[in-house]
Amino acid sequence: MSEQKSWTLKSIAKELGISNATVSNAFNRPDQLSKKRREEILESCQKLGYSGPNKAAQSLRKGQSNIVALVLPDSVEYMISDPVASDFVKGVSSVLEKSNVNLLLFSGASENINAVSDFVDGFICYGSPRNPNLVEQLRTTAKKVVTADFDIDRKASVGIDNEQAAYDISKLAIKSKNDDIAILGLRLLDSNLTCRVYELPDDEGTPSIAHKRLAGYQKAIKEHGAELRNDRIWNIPKSSHEVALIAAREALTSTPRPNVILCMSDLIALAVLQEICAMGLNVPNDIRVVGFDGIDEASRSTPPLTTVHQNSEEKGNMAAELFINRATNAVVIPYHIEIGHTVNSN
């Protein structure tokens, strides 16, 4: 037999002197051949270096690849280190694997979903991508799209009621109109700077998660008759301990020092607790702190953190189920408040 550098189904069939269909059946439909005949064909193909029909070409012909691209809001490197995102990915993958569907992680900082669009059955998008161009591409693609924690008018979506959850957790932390309140926000601004927020940009379309949580905080503050000073909101560009510490130190050294700190993630809240401890202050007697997410570290902190548990793994389960079932509805999943020791019980 002659040597050939690159085999196709057609050329390997010609080389073996059999039909294209017989080669295809040997790889894809073993019930169509006797065991002996199939083994002979596969052995000959192996000797020639032919591993079977091109899977990408098969996928294009069938219009199905059994691969779903999970579009993350930021770089893959950052997102896999985030415990909330990790729980979501775990939830998505556990459902897809049961349906023999593979998962491709796609960075929200990328330029174009078209790089993978031809090779996937569709997209699950977790949070609004950092690159705004991807949002429009996801809105207009012909492929199936399910969004989590934001909406692009593709109908299939899953999330929690962020505004109500933020309101509920704030009600536990704020005790009177005399409270001095600080908010450590997460991506309130489209900026990489950790800074005070004196003016929020106008929302175009659907408000972001951060703005919904801020609205919940503001509602609770107003109901208590308290005042949120215009220098008491911080923008933190990403949910990481090191970046959050910068805002925590600035807030805790403000004059007067706030006695209530509302944090838009547990990682931010844990950084605040560390700094409060380093200053020799007491939680909750001197300062009351609440978080948002319900990560495992929150329950193990000293003291245990009061936070919103948003059931991220369940959210991932639901996103995957919506995709597999080709659903077109929006699903709001429940959250619950985990009561720790960072607010007064009375």
Image: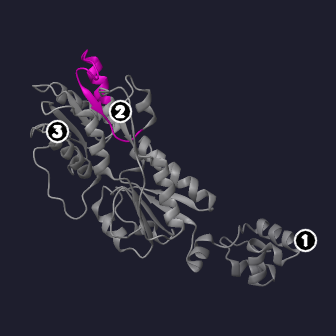
Range shown magenta: 271-294
x and y percentages locating residue 170 in the rendered image: 26, 39
Confirm whether the magenta stretch covers residue 133: no
Q: Residue at left 47%, top 59%?
A: 319
| First reached walking from the N terminus: tag 3 or tag 1 | 1
Kind of residue indicated by mark 3:
His
Rendered view: 249 above or below 293 = above
Which residue bears the numbered disc 3? Answer: 224
Q: Quadrant of the C terminus?
A: top left
Which residue bears the numbered disc 2? Answer: 306
Query: Would you call the spot at circle 2 few (<14 residues within 10 Å), some (14-19), or many (20 or more)?
Result: many
Q: Residue at left 23%, top 25%?
A: 287
Rendered view: 139 above or below 72 = below
Query: Would you call the spot at circle 1 few (<14 residues within 10 Å), some (14-19), or many (20 or more)?
Result: few
Q: Residues under labels 3 and 1: Cα distance?
A: 81 Å
x and y percentages locating residue 88 in the rendered image: 46, 50
Q: Is residue 345 visible?
A: yes
Determine the secondary structure under disc 3.
Answer: loop
**Left/right of residue 63 with respect to residue 88 in the rendered view:** right
Query: Would you call the spot at circle 3 few (<14 residues within 10 Å), some (14-19), or many (20 or more)?
Result: some
Confirm whether the magenta stretch covers residue 281: yes
| First reached walking from the N terminus: tag 2 or tag 1 | 1
Q: Residues under labels 2 and 1: Cα distance?
A: 66 Å
**What's the mark number on residue 36?**
1
Kind of residue indicated by mark 2:
Thr
